[in-house]
Amino acid sequence: MISRQKHDPFAAMRIPEYRHLMLGRFLFIMGLRMMGTLVGWWIYELTNEPFAIGLIGLSEVIPAVSLSLYAGHVIDISEKRKLLLKGVSLYLCCALLLLGLSTRYTASQISNHWIAFSIYIIIFFTGIFRAFTGPTFGTMLASIVPKNILQNATTWNQGIWLSASVTGHATVGFLIAGLGNTGSLAIICLLVTLGLSFMYLLKPKPPLNEPGEKKTLDSVKEGLNFVFRTKEVLGALSLDLFAVLFGGAVAMIPVFAKDVLKTGPIGFGWLNAASDIGSILIIITLTIAPMRSGQGKKLLLAVGGFGLCIIIFALSKIFWLSFAVLMLSGILDGISVVIRGTILQLKTPDHMRGRVMSVNSMFINSSNELGQFESGVAAKLMGVIPSVIFGGCMTLLVVTTTWFKAPSLRKMEY
């Protein structure tokens, strides 16, 4: 009689190098999420203009998208530990520049207009560094953990990211209230430095592809062709791209916090954290009890529910209701994140991980910034509340279209 192997929810975390990667990533992402949240609040303080928040996303997404395909080629032919350390170090330099920009001395010497302009320039450079750094984290998973626990490692990876995100979002509201922008940015610089110290403990990860083995353009085309040939990967990425693009209500939370719900920095921090709290709760659940079937259908239903939550958030005038629907949207988003991440890790060949993860970064990560810009433009054209309702409705439309037009994704299981 054959006994079924017991599921070990901590399988990946028992590997010391994987723990170092996750600890480094947790501290790094926590610092970055704090920085992103703080910059949104800071820009709105400087300009009192919702559209200015949208420009933050545009500033980062232009270089991130423009360089993502080339970055994938570079990652596949590079020693990944060295590339990761270099990218995180450059992020730290940007955080230090923002710290200097936030001081009282700078405010006494430079107008709000030029401070805001300088913030956009610094965020532009973070987009360049993110094009290389973000996908590198994803490529390192498969080189550290054996394939039979890759699904477990992917779930932990998403959980660590979301834990860092919720901690960063929630904490920065309290920090702004207690320490101001300058004190908060000092804490952010410290967190990124600590994260970098854990990444130094990783072993070198030599490339599987030799430099010059293929021309850059041919290498980029190979990665794109793989994504477009693999229908489940393409469907999952496309669905999330449009859902996040149109459902980016989070970008307008500074406006809802100040002008609709009449709350201060602490309430703003909790609203920012709400969706991530939901996401981490579901990630913990899925780590202990992973989904065994019907993942494609669950992905579509989760994204549809996410769009409905965004509409309710736009209509709410009550803080606790706004918080609750954002938390529910995070639960649903967490389900989609785990399914998409697992599909990507399981279906991508090792020698193409850099390029495929970069396409994923272009589709998914940059959709957050494009969604932020879309939200800013829509808010300027329609008003804040109608623009968020519009985004939620468009998300529902995308899901409905995908349900009927992509049956292979709907029926997909792993």
Image (spheres, rainbow, N blue to C red):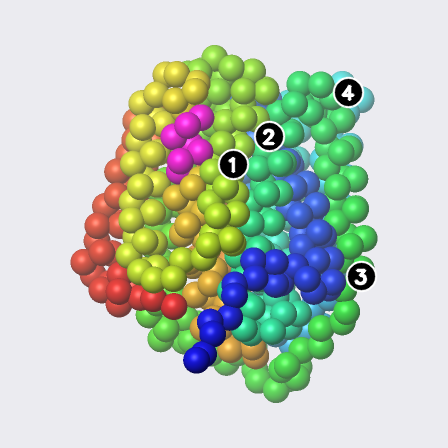
Local crowd size for mark 4, using a 10 Å CA cut-off: few (<14), some (14–19), many (≥20): few
Task: Tell me how many marks there are.
Answer: 4
- Which comes sooner in the sequence, label 1 or label 2? 2
Local crowd size for mark 3, using a 10 Å CA cut-off: few (<14), some (14–19), many (≥20): some
Q: Nearer the viewer, mark 2 or mark 4?
A: 2
Cα distance between the residues tagged 1 and 4? 34 Å
Q: In the depicted view, which residue is nearer to us: 386 or 352?
A: 352
Residue bearing mark 1 = 277
Residue bearing mark 2 = 170
Identify which amino acid the numbered label 2 is placed on.
Answer: Ala
Task: State the residue at coordinates (42%, 75%).
Answer: 226
Point out the stretch of residues depicted in magenta: 323-329
Identify which amino acid the numbered label 4 is placed on.
Answer: Arg
- Which comes sooner in the sequence, label 3 or label 2? 2
- Which comes sooner in the sequence, label 3 or label 4? 4
Residue bearing mark 3 = 201
Is-magenta flag for residue 236? no
Quadrant into which the C terminus falls: bottom left
Cα distance between the residues tagged 2 and 4? 25 Å
Contact, mark 1 vs mark 3 (Cβ under 8 Å): no
Q: Which residue lies furthest to the left in this view?
A: 404
Decide if residue 244 is on the left or right side of residue 173: left
Contact, mark 1 vs mark 4 (Cβ under 8 Å): no
Contact, mark 1 vs mark 2 (Cβ under 8 Å): yes
Residue bearing mark 4 = 104
Asked whether the viewer can see residue 61, the reply is no
Q: In the depicted view, which residue is nearer to us: 268 or 369?
A: 268
